[in-house]
Amino acid sequence: HFVEEALSNVYHKTHGAGIALVMPACTQMALDRGVDTEERLAQLATNVFEVSPEAGTAREVAQEGIDRMRAWLEGMGLPTTIREYAGVDSVSEETIDEILSYVKCGDDGIFFGYGNVTRDDVRDMLESIA
């Protein structure tokens, strides 16, 4: 939510569209960080996106779930990049910095639910969906 709130401060779009944009990226970051997330995200994939638990390792099942989440959101016509969300051709470093200026971050990082997420982590995530 904290990343979506920062995007909304810059682009003044609806909360739902912003969540649709950041949820797959946040989920991917959680999986990539591997902080006790594979099993939980595999459950999400199985229970929500109907990925067979036998489709591979917990990590592979979780990744398939993230891929299906993105496809589901795209299928509804929701934005999957900041460019689509904002209706712009490109997202500059200055814009990323502006978005980051709205992210509330303590000196030791942001609590994300799967460990501390730093401003650099958020920058990487924003750049991945720019």
Image (cartoon, grey):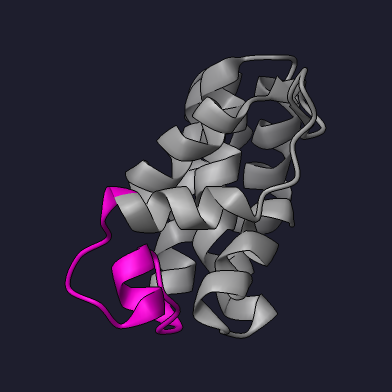
Image location (x, y in percent) of residue 30: 62, 29
- Identify the residue at image location x=77%, y=17%: 108
Q: Is residue 31 positioned above or below 88 on the image?
A: above
Q: Is residue 54 visible?
A: no
- Identify the residue at image location x=63%, y=66%: 19
Image location (x, y in percent) of residue 48: 69, 56
By secondary structure, the bulk of the magenta-drawn segment is best described as loop
Seen in the image, is 47 located left or right of residue 7? right
- Identify the residue at image location x=40%, y=84%: 77
Image location (x, y in percent) of residue 1: 74, 57
Instruction: State how many labels appear.
Output: 0
- Identify the residue at image location x=35%, y=44%: 127
Q: Residue furthest left?
A: 89
Q: Quadrant of the C terminus?
A: bottom left
Q: Is residue 5 positioned above or below 67 on the image?
A: below
Q: Is residue 12 positioned above or below 81 on the image?
A: below
Seen in the image, is 81 located left or right of residue 123? left
Q: Which residues are magenta?
A: 75-93
Residue 27 versus residue 71: which sits nearer the camera? 27
Assess whether residue 85 is covered by the magenta stretch: yes
Q: Is residue 12 positioned above or below 59 on the image?
A: below
